[in-house]
Image: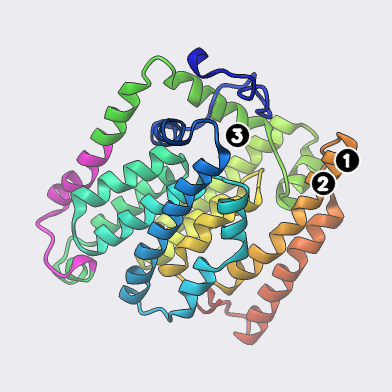
Amino acid sequence: LNPYHSDTLPRLVNFPEIKTIYPPVAQLVFRLSYTLFGESVTGMKFLFLLAALGSICFFYPILKEKGGEARWLLLFAWNPLVIMETAVNGHLDILMVFFLLMSLWLFYKNKLAFSGIALACAILSKLIPVILLPVFFFFFLAAKNAKDAKAAGGRDLKGFFSVNLAFFMPLFFTIAAFYAIYFESAQNMFLTAINYSSKWFFNNPLFMAILGIVGKNQTAHLVSFSLFIVVYLVILTRPMPFEKKTFYVIAAFVLMNPTIHPWYLIILLALLCVHRSTLVVLWSGLVVVSYIVVYQFKLTGTWKDSWLVMILEYLPLVVLLIIYFVRNRGSFKVQQN
């Protein structure tokens, strides 16, 4: 990347000594931004705004397909968190969301090969959607009979193995083709991902409680990851609609990730098109209090999680959960929140 070095970059990058964690599609979008706008951050934000508009265009037909009310579109399109983290802070999560919603829309149109390619592009924008691959596999497994197959896309699926080939072969081929471009540096991306997932933490009271018990950062990460795997397997194996399973898997990942930055919630807001959740909308407003930690860092040079900040953010969510639980007389119906 030496030809791209200048007086501005990478000098102003927060951690210039760490290899990039961003996958190939994200890298190509960065390259497109540089080609069109040079080192202009505003130019890159413009590309992300286009991805946001595209996400809205996919969100609405999916919402109609799933029988949701139009107000949920506004709760995504006009959500201050989405606007702030896309147009102001310029995070690329909206690029991942664009391809993920495209994949879901194509999936409901029964265009499985193109849906697989779009999901691959979502994974190649940011790795998070890779955890949805088993969700699709279990759906196809459950859709072997004609009734479930028709519910999937409006016509009979031709068989479990042929459907899997139609979806997963283009997906894996796309991932392989893009990573071939970055063959020499792909290992660095995964090493950085391992570094991030084993050491970093922020704004997660569950992880902080685990850390307080075990005392060691990497041990706490291992415990947190193990808990996520257990929850993940429970969600995968329980009989529930594809949409609910998709939402819960991503929600579990965000909630149990040792690091919860505000922009991590964008993908949950995007999935409101398939599963409505008042809790996520509330959280998207409360999560901004975590920026207090960032402001303190800018003033003092010290980055430190605050229990007071996390209480302000998470206590209202716990209260709302209790209210739903009481209203349902001890039988908490997640689909109603």
The structure residue drawn at horizontal position 88% and vertical position 40%, both measured from the top left corner, is 299
Residue 285 location in percent, x, y?
67, 65
**Foreground tag (2 vs 3):** 2
| Left or right of 118, for residue 322 | right
Helix or strand or loop: what does disc 2 sit on?
helix
Helix or strand or loop: what does disc 3 sit on?
helix
Residue 152 location in percent, x, y?
23, 66
Residue identified by numbered label 1: 299
Distance between mark 2 and mark 1 Cα atoms? 6 Å
Q: Does the image show residue 291?
A: yes
Question: Mark 1 near mark 3, Cβ–Cβ under 8 Å?
Answer: no
Residue identified by numbered label 2: 295
Pick the front one: 165 or 34: 34
> Which range is magenta?
152-172
Residue 262 location in percent, x, y?
65, 53
Distance between mark 2 and mark 3 Cα atoms? 24 Å
Pick the front one: 126 or 215: 126
- Amino acid type, mark 1: Leu
Q: Earlier in the sequence, mark 1 or mark 3?
A: 3
**Foreground tag (1 vs 3):** 1
Number of residues whose C-alpha sits closer than 10 Å to that of mark 3, classed few (under 14), some (14–19) or many (20 or more):
some
- Amino acid type, mark 2: Tyr
Q: Earlier in the sequence, mark 2 or mark 3?
A: 3
The residue most toward the right is 300
Q: Is residue 254 magenta?
A: no
Number of residues whose C-alpha sits closer than 10 Å to that of mark 1, classed few (under 14), some (14–19) or many (20 or more):
few
